[in-house]
Image: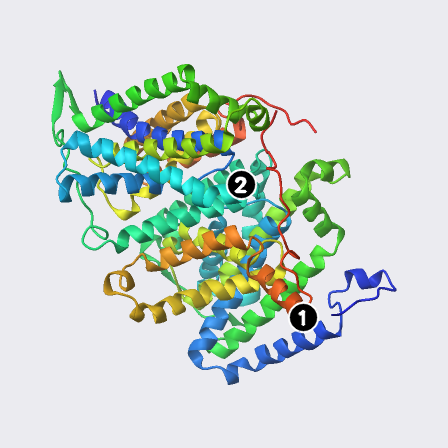
Amino acid sequence: MRYIFKTDYEQDIRIVKHGGQAFWYSLLGVFLLLSPWLLPEYLLAQLIFVLIYSVIGLGLMLLSGFTGQFSIGHAAFMGVGAYTQAVLTNAGWPFPLAFACAGGLSGIVGIVIGVPALRVKGIYLGIATLAFGFIVEEGMARWESVTGGNAGMHVKSPAMFGWTLDSNAEFYFLCLAITVGATLALLNLLRSPTGRAFVAIRDSEISAQSMGIHLARYKTVSFALSAALAGIGGALYAHKIKFLSPEQFSILQSIDLLLMVVIGGLGSVHGVFLGAIFLITMPQLIAMGKDYLPESVGQSPGLQAVVYGVVLVAFVMFEPHGLYGRWLKIRTYLQIFPFYRAGMFKRQKAFQKSDRLK
Amino acid sequence: MQFVQLIISGSAQGCIYGLIALGFVLIYKATETVTFAQGDLMMLGAFCGLVLMTILGFPFWLAVLCSIAAMAVFGVFVERLVIRPVLGQPAFSIVMLTIGIAYIARGLITMVPVIGTETHTLPVPYKDMTLRLGELVLAYEHLVVIGATALLCVGLYALFRYSKIGIAMQAASQNQIAAYYMGIPVQRLNGMVWGLAAAVAAIAGLLLAPITFVHANMGFIGLKAFPAAVVGGFGSLPGAIVGGLIIGIVESLSGFYLPEGFKDIAPYIVVLIMLMVKPNGLFGEKLRKKV
């Protein structure tokens, strides 16, 4: 068991809390830096997808895990970013410029949807973002002169200043740099007054407002940042997948993104990465397990849906803090070995918190 | 004439949205959770009717009654096994839970050999019959939907107005703790509300099946019922039906008069406008939060 004896206020907001963290994260960093040489091409491609989904997940986590606003249309922001990047890259813009535009435009769209969404909360917000997601998807399918419509559109490799990143390894390092940058930015944001305000809004809007937090401003900021991160992720996604079509950004994608943050663990940055790993490896695991199942079950197109559904239901019922919550329990168990008690992480018996107005 | 025709087919579609939205509202009023599984409950109801009619060879009326009853029992079970243990968790967890249930239902249906992966027509006695009124040509399928919805509304009105259970349900939805102190078994009633919602969904599925087809993805229509519920005001039963009608008619008119592509997004545009102008919906009560 590790006791951190705090002697300085700085220690409270330090990103790396103690030596153990520094050691393990540098080990992870070394592994990630060396992985193009360590991993076969296929696994590297999967790792790229994990990184891309992590960036998008960071955005959604900021909005739903830390600000408590839920979006059932996040794939739309991802789509805006992806199409912006695709159109600008194909027009010959250098990568950094196109990338900034993709993130910026998604952020602006986020503000546009965020402002009317301020009047509504809870499930109404979910429905507003759901409606917005459908409208954007339809827009992408119908605006054929720009997006190529349902026929889809090809995306060139990212290029900047005479240097084209067309190999997997080069693109991997690009994604890695952006993911690390986004993660550090988010961690930094969360320990700043802005991030604290987000968390206060999540925990109770009324008490946050009484503390002098401007609800509308902070919610808009959260929406914009979240959408911008989703747009950045979408831009990388466009380069990775190389072929865009509107159904990649449908409601199902939005639900996958939500699944990722919920299974990873709402309200933890680690959860984003665990959720992204889950989302990417699960289809592979299902494909491997298929052969051991009876024909009618193993070959059915709905197998993946059933597995996702069961996992989702199981997590909400038995482990509301997701994969990260489970890891915390395992870690505590090991750290204080024989003293772990069954009730240590017992869920508080909560009375139903009513949104209903009386 | 064309206009009237469009209005009628839109109303029929709108009744379906209204019935699904009714399920949302029932569950929302009772347990304050929003379910995303309502569309898939409808799909299960339609499949249930299909199996009873084509494979087991039940007569039409018996099959309809049996599938409604089966879905009601299923709804009670879902509430007892999955929803009740997590009540009191953040609302969003429960939304995710119902999305999970919807995924499972959709996936399991495709695993049923023979019927799961294909599209079917439901053999109803009024298939392909039309009624001519002067220049109007009305499909019986649409008329049956409208008629059945009207009957169901009268039935639900009577239930909530005159029966003990209905009044108890209203009491529980207004204030759970007070209702509990008055001796109303709130939890059991919540289970029954889920059963009722599932039964309404089954009716919607059986009514929709002759118009479209029966297939595993028909539950996605449930997503269009959200706009209906919001337009009517999320806590109002008549609002759900009116909202459904509005959404159905808007969709049908915009499919005809507006350029291609507007038909599918018209309901969502309507709901966004509604949320901006009048977030409480047409029939929602104006309430303020007290601390």
Residue at x-position 35% and y-position 55%: A148
Circles 1 and 2 on the same chain: no
Is residue A163 visible in this depiction of the protein?
Answer: no
> Considering the numbered disc 2 on the image, is that residue within a helix, a strand or a loop?
loop
Separation of residues labelled 1 and 2 (CA atoms)? 33 Å
The answer to the question of whether label 1 and label 2 lie on touching residues, with beta carbons closer than 8 A, is: no
Q: Amino acid at mark 1?
A: Phe
Quadrant (top left, top right, bottom left, bottom right) of the C terminus of chain B: top right
Between disc 1 and disc 2, the foreground one is 1
Read off the residue under disc 2. Answer: B87
Residue B65 spot, x, y in % from top left = 23, 31
In which quarter of the view is residue A335 placed? Answer: bottom right
Q: Secondary structure at mark 1?
A: loop
Residue A199 lies left or right of residue B229; in this view the side is right
Q: Quick check: A26 left or right of A279?
A: right
Q: Is there any visible trace of residue A269 in the rendered image?
A: yes
Q: Chain of mark 1?
A: A
- When asked about the image quadrant of residue A283, the answer is bottom left
**Looking at the picture, does residue A171 appear above or below residue B106?**
below
Q: Is residue A264 left or right of residue B132?
A: right
- Residue linked to disc 1: A337
Image spot of residue A117 (x, y percent): 56, 38
Q: What numbered label is drawn on residue A156?
A: none
Q: Nearer the viewer, residue A287 or B193?
A: B193
Q: Residue at x 34, y 48 (%)?
A: B105
